[in-house]
Each structure stands twice: as structure tokens, then as C-alpha cells.
Image: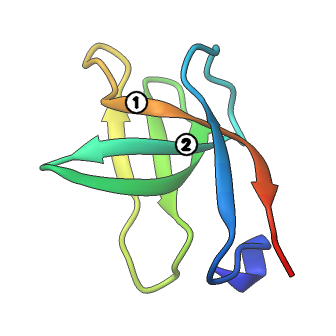
Amino acid sequence: LEKMGLYIGDQLLIETSTALVAGNIVLIELDGKLLLRKMEQTNNAWMLFPLLQQLAPLEWPFHIPLPLVGVVRQIIRQF
């Protein structure tokens, strides 16, 4: 996560009512778990890439509603 600029103890400001744009970092709820993913767009699907390299990306077709919680707008770090 440090490669993405996220550290233990960081807080995220999540905007819940926003349009999706390729390159956004999004928070989704999948199977009762909250997941952070970097969003990219293909011709017919969103590609949701994990912030940790050891996890697999998810392909999410446009015709299926994305279980979006919100888009990360700011990282808040307290020292």
C-alpha cells in the first residue's frame, strides 16, 4: 500500500455521490467485505486492480451495477 501512498493509520475521505472515472481509487463492498481498488476502463468492463500486488484484479461488466461505496478523494495522515 505504501507504493500507492497509503500507510497504517491513514484515514480516507470517501465521496459517495460522484461519477466514476478511470484512474479513481474506489471503495467497493463485495461479499460483505470492503475493498479498495484502482479503477480502469476497457471497452465493456471496469477493471478493478488491487492496491496489493498479490491479489488478482476483478473485471466488472458495465451492465452489472458496481457495488460502489464511494471514491477516495483524500488521504488524511496524522503524525
For marks 1 and 2, give the CA distance. 7 Å
Closer-to-camera residue (46/70): 70
Give the side of residue 12 with respect to residue 67, left or right: right
Residue 76 screen position, x and y as percent: 79, 59
> Does dot 2 land on a helix, a strand or a loop?
strand
Residue 5 screen position, x and y as percent: 79, 73
The residue positioned farthest toward the left in the image shown: 31
Give the side of residue 67 with respect to residue 3, left or right: left
Quarter occupied by residue 40: top right
Mark 1 or mark 2: whose residue is earlier in sequence: 2
Image coloring type: rainbow
Label 2, residues with CA under 10 Å away: few <14, some 14-19, many ≥20:
many
Q: Are marks 1 and 2 in contact (CB under 8 Å)?
A: yes
Q: Image height check: is 33 above or below 23? A: below
Residue 55 screen position, x and y as percent: 38, 77
| Label annotation for residue 18 | none
The residue located at (62%, 83%) in the rendering is 8
Please name the amino acid that badge 2 sits on: Val
The residue located at (76%, 81%) in the rendering is 3
Quarter of the picture containing the C terminus is bottom right
Quarter of the picture containing the N terminus is bottom right
| Label annotation for residue 26 | 2
Quarter occupied by residue 11: bottom right
Residue 50 screen position, x and y as percent: 49, 65
The residue positioned farthest toward the front in the image shown: 79
Q: Image height check: is 38 above or below 17? A: below
- The residue singled out by tag 1 in the image is 68
Closer-to-camera residue (4/42): 4
Closer-to-camera residue (8/72): 8
Please name the amino acid that badge 1 sits on: Leu
